[in-house]
Image: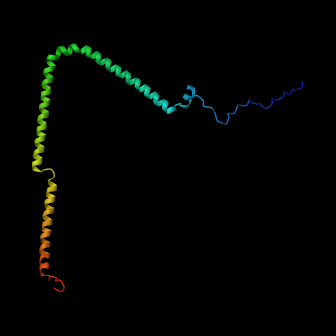
Amino acid sequence: MAERQQPSPGPVTRPQRPTPPTGPQPQQQPTLLRWVHDHVPNSAQVIGFLTLLISGGILLFLTGLTVTLSTMGLIVFTPLILLSSPIWVPLAAALFVAVAGLLMVSGFGLAGLAGATWVYRPVGSERVDYARGRIADTAGHVKDYAREYGGYLQSKPRDTAPGA
């Protein structure tokens, strides 16, 4: 039997796509799908949104847990607080008075120390001492200048106007 050669298929031709017109096009109405396609977030934005969503959920859960446990604790411990209040109310008042007195005495002591320091060495006394020294030095220089040049001016003959 002779081998039969099958005819090779010719080049495959695809149907031509219609080319868009190059002239002025009518305004297309934006559809939801086109808007979503134009505003697709990148991967960093997706990760950021997921992080925000997960963190917000965790914080919301923790907030609810805190409020629930605080309410439950208040319900459970209110009778104990009311029964023991004759003990802790005077104790809290005495503690408040002691702390306030300690702070007041410390404040008065600090104010007295600051006053004594100021009386001993007033703020800005370095400037006053410096200015006093500068004035004394300037007065001494003026005095020396007057001694040196005072005799010079007296010994110099006076100029007279010509023709006088």
* Residue 9 shown left or right of residue 121 in the figure: right
* Residue 67 shown left or right of residue 31 in the figure: left
Residue depicted at x 12% and y 48%: 118
Q: Quadrant of residue 66?
A: top left
Residue depicted at x 13% and y 60%: 132
Residue depicted at x 15% and y 20%: 89
Residue depicted at x 13% and y 30%: 100
Q: In the image, residue 50 lies at what x, y percent? A: 46, 27
Q: In the image, residue 149 lies at what x, y percent? A: 14, 76
Q: Is residue 139 above or below residue 121?
A: below
Q: In the image, residue 87 lies at what x, y percent? A: 14, 18
* Residue 71 shown left or right of residue 105 in the figure: right
Q: Quadrant of the C terminus?
A: bottom left
The colour scheme of the drawn protein is: rainbow
Q: Quadrant of the N terminus?
A: top right
* Residue 23 shown left or right of residue 145 in the figure: right
- Count of labels shown? 0
Residue that sits furthest to the right in the current view: 1
Q: In the image, residue 152 lies at what x, y percent? A: 14, 79
